Image (cartoon, helix red, strand yellow):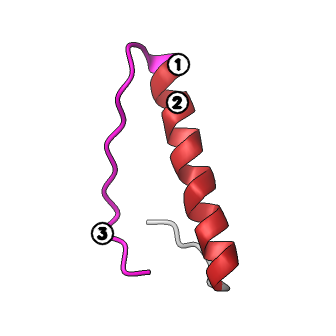
Amino acid sequence: MNLSGGADFYATDVRGLEHEGKISLDIYLDACKRSGISPRKR
């Protein structure tokens, strides 16, 4: 996937940032699953 590991999140409060982060993580994990690769932690 050659991801750079960067992501930008925009929200008006911490709860909104947590929500946006979860959405991004879910998308990443789904893309890994569809591509048949293991997600990595840094």
Q: Is residue 29 above or below residue 3?
A: above
Residue 37: x %, y % from top left: 62, 84
Measured as percent of width and height from the top left, residue 41 is found at: 51, 66
Pointer 2 and pointer 1: residues touching (CB < 8 Å)?
yes
Compared with 30, 10 (above or below) is above
Measured along the vertical axis of the image, is residue 30 above or below residue 2? above
- What is the quadrant of the C terminus in the image? bottom left
Q: Residue at x 39, y 22 (%)?
A: 11
Cα–Cα gap, marks 2 and 3: 21 Å
Q: Is residue 21 left or right of residue 5?
A: right
Disc 2 target residue: 18
Q: Secondary structure at mark 2?
A: helix
26 sits left or right of 20 in the view: right
Task: Say which amino acid is labelled 1.
Answer: Arg
* Disc nearer the start of the sequence (3/1): 3
Q: Decide which of 6, 42 is in the foreground and name it.
A: 6
Q: Residues within 10 Å of mark 2 (few under 14, many from 20)?
A: few
At a point 35% along the width and 63% down the height, the residue shown is: 5
Q: As shown in the figure, which amino acid type bears the numbered disc 2?
A: Glu
As drawn, the label of residue 41 is none
Asked which quadrant contains residue 19, the reply is top right
Q: Picture quarter containing residue 9?
A: top left
- Residue at 61% from the left image edge and 74% from the top image edge: 32
Q: Earlier in the sequence, mark 2 or mark 3?
A: 3
Disc sitting over residue 15 in the figure: 1
* Label 1: how many Cα within 10 Å (few below 14, some 14–19, many 20+): few
The residue segment tinted magenta is 1-15
Q: Which mark is residue 4?
A: 3
Q: Is residue 10 magenta?
A: yes
**Would residue 17 appear left or right of 23 to someone viewing this image?**
left
The amino acid on which the numbered mark 3 sits, given as a three-letter code, is Ser
